[in-house]
Amino acid sequence: MEILVTGGAGYIGSHTCLELLREGYDVVVIDNLSNSHKIALDRVEKLAEKTITFYEADVMDKAALENIFTNHHIQAVIHFAGLKAVGESVEKPLSYYKNNLISSLVLFEVMQQYAVKKLVFSSSATVYGVPENTPITEEAPRATTNPYGATKLIIEQMLEDIAASDSSWQISLLRYFNPIGADISGLIGEDPNGIPNNLMPYITQVAAGRLEEVNVYGQDYETHDGTGIRDYIHVVDLAKGHLKALQYSYYGVEAFNLGTGIGSSVLDVISTFEKATGTQIKHKIVNRRPGDVAKCYADSSKAQKLLGWTAEKTLYNMCKDSWEWQSRNPNGYLK
């Protein structure tokens, strides 16, 4: 069974490709490598002892997609491709709307053209905006506080409309929370371009000496230590959630939260990382970032009930595996 993975060379994409190969799927990847590295897929192939068919192209390139669908018997698509940093989306909203929405539109048009109607979409907990209650269920109101989240919400609406117009579509919307960690081998992990936008790669790069200190954005939230609380999920658990969604048999659209259901503050993560690695992390409190919310963690009982999926790894595991990746690859993939 051939699966097309858009953005498959990225952080979550590469870990999902590894799990797909281990489950016996044939994997085709399209990625423009704007925030990823081909070497990640080379290492996935090494770990799985299987090959990936790779196309370096942009998902906005309809001809490139048509070439893939013509030359492969694609039976389902996992759609990761897109810009993904909340803070950057506030600074560059037009880039986010153009990249994330147009690429998705083109992909869905080509899928329809070739009658490939099974899709797992990489959505986000940002579609819940400022949550009224925590833990968050899939029925919670959707509203966003930043352009990145807005693009995810618009794409979800696109897919709901597509499924309403054609009952033969099978679509999973995976709203996941804050992925961290790395494959236990330490061969693949999170390696963003430039200064990291997310907490864990920032911590690991401080630990590796690449950055001086971690900026903690705000200590005046209504939380136990004043810093923002998030639901951190191990990327391997998350990747396995995509396989469960791929194997789920139904018609229409279903949304699933993928998280641990445990909220951890920024300072919790820093202290757990220090315990897991024996490395002290220098940090300082700075002003809040635009678009951030105080608390965001999941109720993932629906995924457990319908997909048979549950997160298994702890925050300690996430920190330990993140550091194994960074310490083995102090400069990321580009040695």
Image (cartoon, grey):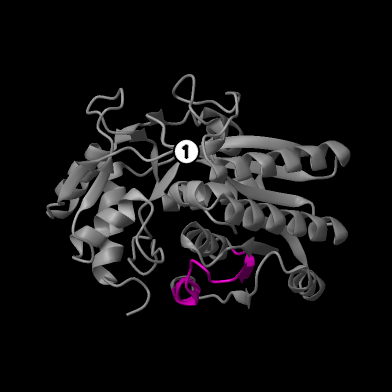
Query: Is residue 80 placed above or below 251 in the rendered structure?
Result: below
**Magenta residues, as a range?**
24-46
Query: Is residue 56 placed above or below 265 in the rendered structure?
Result: below
- Residue most extreme to the bottom: 335
**Looking at the rendering, which quadrant does residue 204 occupy?**
bottom left
Q: Secondary structure at mark 1?
A: loop
Q: Residues within 10 Å of mark 1 (few under 14, many from 20)?
A: some
Percent from the top left, x then y, of residue 308? Answer: 55, 38
148 or 45: nearer the eye?
Answer: 148
Query: Is residue 242 placed above or below 129 in the rendered structure?
Result: below
* Quadrant holding the N terminus: bottom right
Percent from the top left, x then y, of residue 133? Answer: 47, 19
- Residue most extreme to the top: 133
Q: How many marks do you count on the picture?
A: 1
Q: Which residue is mark 1?
A: 310
* Quadrant holding the C terminus: bottom left
Tell me which residue sits at (56%, 64%) in the image: 8
Taking the image as shown, residue 233 lies to the left or right of residue 119, namely: left
142 or 297: nearer the eye?
Answer: 142
Percent from the top left, x then y, of residue 311? Answer: 43, 40
**Looking at the rendering, which quadrant does residue 291 occupy?**
top left
Tell me which residue sits at (45%, 72%) in the image: 40
